[in-house]
Amino acid sequence: QVQLVESGGGLVQAGTSLRLSCAASGRIFDIRAMGWYRRAPGKDRELVATITSGGSTTYLNSVKERFTITISRDNAKNTVYLQMNSLKPEDTAVYYCNADLIRQGVKWGQGTQVTVSS
C-alpha cells in the first residue's frame, strides 16, 4: 500500500514563506510524476505545480507569474517539495500531494492546511 504524507502547512502572515513536503512510502515501483494541488474555500481543486522524474516542471499560470513558488523533488527519497514565497491570503487552501505511479496509478495525500493572514 502506497501512502503519501504531506507536512509543512500552517498559519502564516502574508509576505512570508512556507515549504511543503510530501513523502511517498510503501511498495513503489517507480514514480512518473509528482505534484501539488490545492482547494481554496468554496472553489474547485486546482493544479499548482507538477514535476516529472526527469525534472520537468509545470506551474499554475497565476502563481508562475508571481515567481513565488518552486517545486522540487528528491527521487531517492520519493519526496516532493513546494517552496512558496511571498504568500498572499488568496493562497489559503488545503494543499494536496499527488503521485502518478507506474503500475499503481495515481495516489493522493490527505492534505495539509495553509492559511495566510493579511
Image (cartoon, rainbow, N blue to C red):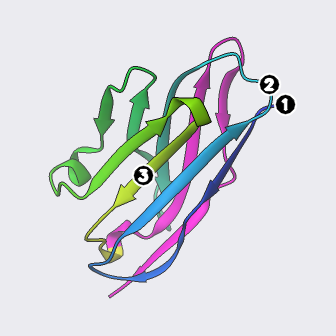
Q: Position of residue 9 (x, y in %)?
A: 54, 68
The percent position of residue 34, horizontal first and vertical second, equals 51, 33
Tell me the number on the disc at residue 82. Answer: 3
Going by the numbered disc 3, the residue's amino acid type is: Leu
The residue at the far top in this view is: 103
Residue that badge 1 annotates: 1
**The magenta segment:** 90-118
* Residue 44 shows up from this direction: no
What secondary structure is the stretch in magenta mostly built from?
A: strand
What is the distance, in whole Å, between disc 2 and disc 1 at their CAs? 6 Å
**Residue with the mark numbered 2:** 27
Q: Please tell me which residue is depicted at 36% across the width and 26% down the height of the picture.
A: 55
For the residues labelled 2 and 1, say whether their Cβ atoms are less than 8 Å apart. Answer: yes
**Which one is in front, 41 or 51?**
51
Please tell me which of labels 2 and 1 falls first in the chain. Answer: 1
Of callouts 2 and 3, the N-terminal one: 2
Q: Position of residue 101 (x, y in %)?
A: 63, 21
Q: Is residue 117 above or below residue 5?
A: below
**Residue drawn at x 26%, y 79% as measured from the top left:** 15
User: Quarter holding the C terminus?
Assistant: bottom left
